[in-house]
């Protein structure tokens, strides 16, 4: 990270000047904010966690609304990612919020491959952005950015530590997305256990080298609160859209026979901390880190993988666009070729099968004919026998009649 | 369409978050001044920024450069906690030769070189988090106060410059014109600009159509162009006040007095209202156009092939070497801008078709 993050550097020979009067460029932040507000913002959250951990409820609670979402059942054959985009507005700020849910995560018996669809999804969004960026005729400024800015990882409130699925998944995601781990349904864990649980989790993360998102401390106005919040990770959250009357106010809460858990009471859970960090303080930083850190890493490795190198000579990667396009076309052509091959094979197979079936059909016909013939012969024989018997009967009758008239 | 919120979420804090980030990172602004020697370019810049940004050539060793030189000086200025890295590019020697043919070339080369630098960085595999922006955001063109009309060289230069950079024309040293002469001069200039299809800043086609107040304000500004200005860094006493101005035998010309000249309008436009817009138009329109042309000329396929390559408007770039000087035959920005939007649509459609 550049020291102090001051744009560029103060070059040698650049003087700092004193102004003899009011120039007026102190309106610059306003100008910038106005332009940004006119354009609107977008933010994309990915929720990963087993079915039933309250992901949808937490999103509803966080954004004070009801995102239509049916509760998922537990028998999904694999992990699928479902993305929904909503338009939210508060005063003059318009936000395009996309919530991506991991459906079926942790439900399978064999969870070896569970993290893969998630990684694929995240990569796909980077890929889409990269392609737009590389286009010759592009519109980056009106592009709907679908890259994931924050990944909320929901940890089961077992109280014991992380499951190996958790570790494996987070290890595969930590260099691709900002991970914010949360302990779901934290009202299950008692206060004493919670503290131990958090420490255990953080230790396991450190031991396994998992890099989670750290709230930034370079801006002095928020450094203190961010630093303090970092020590409270993972946030123990409780979600609820139901309101209970407490005193003379309505509060979001979950009511049990032994008491009421208030969502926005910081003594009961860390919901307020999560909302503060995720929405009210660090949303912009999450977006920026996604763009300047995770996306850059993806871009760099993707382009290097495709064989591009920085040529420090004059002729740089201007053909980047061309070669990237041609490599993509090659890939597409390869896929097309494979498809054609498969189609051809399919046609051949069909022909063969057809031939076989025709042969069987003929055999059956022959058999049938043979049987019919046999049957006819049998019938004929029987008819003859019947006739000869009939003749015998007639002869016998005659003889009997002769004997009676005697 | 909007999902209703049943309580305060805190999304509106985004503006505050963005403001904080901007304050921390600071701003950059790059201005270029183009005009004959002695028209008050350095003085104007110093007046706008209320500091000795440009150093005036001491008259004793003033010499006419034999070619147009490009000289850039950078400073950091601070106001109420906002840090601004300001770069001013001067063009000594412009228009001062006997034969001024192609005097625009070094200027265009400089502008395009900055785009080239930026593009180089943008296209690198390992690139910096924030690409240093040396692109010229604003080019102030100084028109001598003849009172008649634009000179041939003015038309030729501006015609080319508006294709690649935001150009703001000003009438320099306008204190030599009476108000009536000034209005007539302006009317003639405006007509000439229309006649030659010279689209100076603000170009309403590049504007955000959404914000109506901004649109109205820019319309009014456009009607006033070119601004008639006077520059000065010396203060004089007028009545009880101390004002910036030029003292003549017949009175003091006050720079910041709207009745005397239009300096305030220019300063307000460049600094107080349109600075961010100048930067955005540079980045989103001029730079994108440069990038488009640059990447296009590297392709070996014919310019209007269909498929995953965009079919571009049929302009011929006489290019065996990507020499930026040869931009004389490019079409007007407006048409190209529209054509790009059209081919952009085609690209999107073509790409989505070829996606498996």
Image (tube, coloured by chain):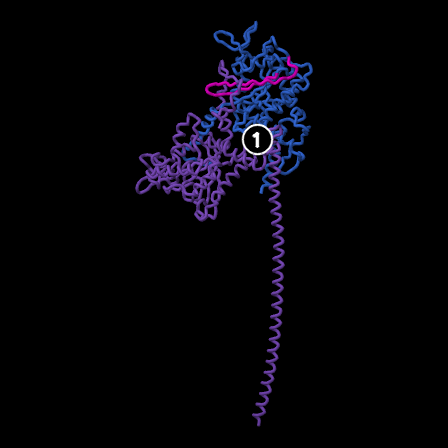
| Rendering coords of residue B98 (x, y %) | 68, 14
Please give the residue where the numbered disc 1 appears in the rendered image: B124
| Chain identifier, blue in the render | B
| Number of residue marks | 1
| Chain identifier, purple in the render | A
Quadrant of the image for the C terminus of chain B? top right
Compared to residue A228, the image places residue B257 above or below, namely above
Residue extending furthest top? B249
Answer left or right for B273 relative to B8: right
Compared to residue B264, the image places residue B281 above or below, namely below
Q: Is residue A32 visible?
A: yes
Chain to which the residue tagged by mark 1 belongs: B
- Magenta highlight range: B64-91
Task: Count neighbours of disc 1 (C-alpha within 10 A) and say few if under 14, some if 14 to 19, many if 20 or more.
Answer: many
| Rendering coords of residue A4 (x, y %) | 47, 25
Compared to residue B284, the image places residue A373 above or below, namely below
What residue sits 62% from the left and 62% below the top? A359
């Amino acid at each position: 990270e550049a020291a102090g993050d001051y744009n560029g550097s103060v070059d040698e020979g650049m003087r700092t000047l004193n102004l003899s009067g009011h120039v007026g460029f102190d309106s610059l932040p306003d100008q910038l904010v106005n332009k940004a507000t006119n354009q609107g913002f977008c933010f994309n959250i990915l929720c990963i966690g087993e079915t039933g951990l309250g992901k949808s409820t937490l999103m509803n609670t966080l954004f004070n609304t009801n995102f239509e979402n049916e509760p998922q059942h537990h028998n999904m054959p694999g992990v699928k990612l479902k993305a929904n985009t909503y338009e939210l507005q508060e005063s003059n700020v318009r936000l395009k919020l996309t919530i991506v849910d991991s459906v079926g995560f942790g439900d399978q018996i064999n969870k070896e491959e569970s993290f893969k669809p998630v990684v694929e999804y995240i990569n796909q969004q980077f890929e889409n952005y990269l392609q737009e960026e590389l286009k010759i005729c592009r519109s980056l400024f009106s592009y709907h950015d679908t890259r994931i800015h924050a990944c909320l990882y929901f940890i089961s409130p077992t109280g014991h530590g992380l499951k190996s699925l958790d570790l494996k998944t987070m290890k595969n995601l930590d260099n691709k997305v900002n991970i914010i781990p949360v302990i779901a349904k934290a009202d299950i864990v008692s206060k004493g256990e919670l503290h131990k649980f958090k420490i255990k989790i953080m230790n396991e993360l450190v031991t396994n080298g998992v890099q989670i998102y750290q709230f930034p401390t370079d801006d002095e106005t928020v450094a203190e609160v961010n630093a303090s919040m970092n020590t409270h990770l993972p946030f123990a959250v409780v979600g609820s859209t139901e309101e209970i009357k407490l005193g003379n106010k309505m509060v979001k809460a979950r009511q049990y026979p032994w008491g009421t858990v208030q969502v926005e009471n910081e003594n009961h859970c860390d919901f307020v901390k999560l909302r503060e960090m995720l929405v009210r303080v660090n949303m912009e930083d999450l977006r920026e880190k996604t763009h300047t850190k995770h996306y850059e890493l993806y871009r760099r490795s993707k382009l290097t993988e495709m064989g591009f190198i920085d040529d420090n000579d004059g002729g740089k990667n201007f053909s980047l666009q061309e070669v990237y396009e041609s490599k993509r076309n090659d890939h597409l052509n390869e896929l097309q070729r494979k498809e054609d091959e498969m189609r051809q094979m399919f046609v051949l197979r069909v022909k063969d099968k057809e031939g076989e079936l025709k042969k069987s059909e003929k055999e059956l016909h022959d058999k049938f004919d043979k049987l019919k013939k046999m049957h006819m012969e049998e019938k004929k024989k029987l008819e003859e026998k019947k006739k000869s018997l009939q003749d015998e009967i007639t002869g016998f009758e005659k003889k009997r009649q002769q004997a009676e008239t005697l | 369409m909007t999902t209703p919120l049943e309580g305060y979420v805190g999304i509106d804090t985004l503006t505050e978050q963005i403001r904080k980030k901007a304050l921390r990172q600071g701003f950059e602004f790059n201005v270029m001044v183009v005009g004959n020697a002695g028209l008050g370019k350095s003085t104007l810049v110093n007046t706008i920024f209320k500091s000795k940004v440009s150093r005036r050539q001491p008259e004793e060793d003033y010499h006419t450069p034999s070619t147009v030189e490009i000289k850039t000086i950078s400073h950091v200025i601070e106001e109420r906690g906002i840090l601004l890295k300001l770069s001013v590019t001067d063009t000594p020697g412009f228009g001062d030769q006997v034969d001024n043919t192609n005097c625009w070339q070094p200027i265009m080369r400089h502008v395009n070189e900055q785009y080239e630098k930026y593009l180089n960085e943008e296209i690198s595999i390992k690139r910096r988090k924030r690409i240093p922006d040396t692109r010229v955001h604003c080019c102030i063109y100084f028109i001598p106060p003849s009172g008649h009309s634009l000179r041939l060289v003015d038309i030729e230069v501006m015609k080319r410059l508006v294709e690649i950079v935001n150009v703001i024309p000003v009438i320099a040293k306008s204190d030599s014109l009476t108000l009536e002469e000034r209005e007539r001069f302006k009317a003639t200039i405006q007509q000439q600009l229309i006649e030659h299809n010279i689209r100076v800043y603000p170009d309403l086609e590049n504007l955000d159509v959404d914000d109506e107040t901004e649109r109205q304000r820019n319309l009014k500004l456009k009607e006033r162009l070119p601004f008639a200005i006077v520059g000065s860094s010396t203060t004089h006493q007028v009545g009880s006040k101390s004002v910036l101005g030029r003292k003549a035998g017949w009175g003091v010309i006050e720079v910041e007095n709207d009745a005397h000249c239009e300096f305030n309008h220019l300063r307000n436009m460049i600094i107080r209202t349109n600075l961010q817009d100048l930067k955005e138009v540079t980045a989103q329109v001029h730079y994108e156009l440069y990038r488009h042309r640059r990447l296009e000329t590297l392709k070996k396929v014919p310019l209007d092939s269909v498929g995953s390559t965009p079919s571009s408007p049929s302009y011929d770039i006489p290019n065996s070497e990507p020499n930026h000087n040869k931009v004389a035959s490019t079409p007007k920005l407006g048409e190209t801008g529209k054509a790009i939007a059209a081919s952009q649509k085609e690209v999107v459609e073509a790409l989505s078709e070829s996606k498996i």
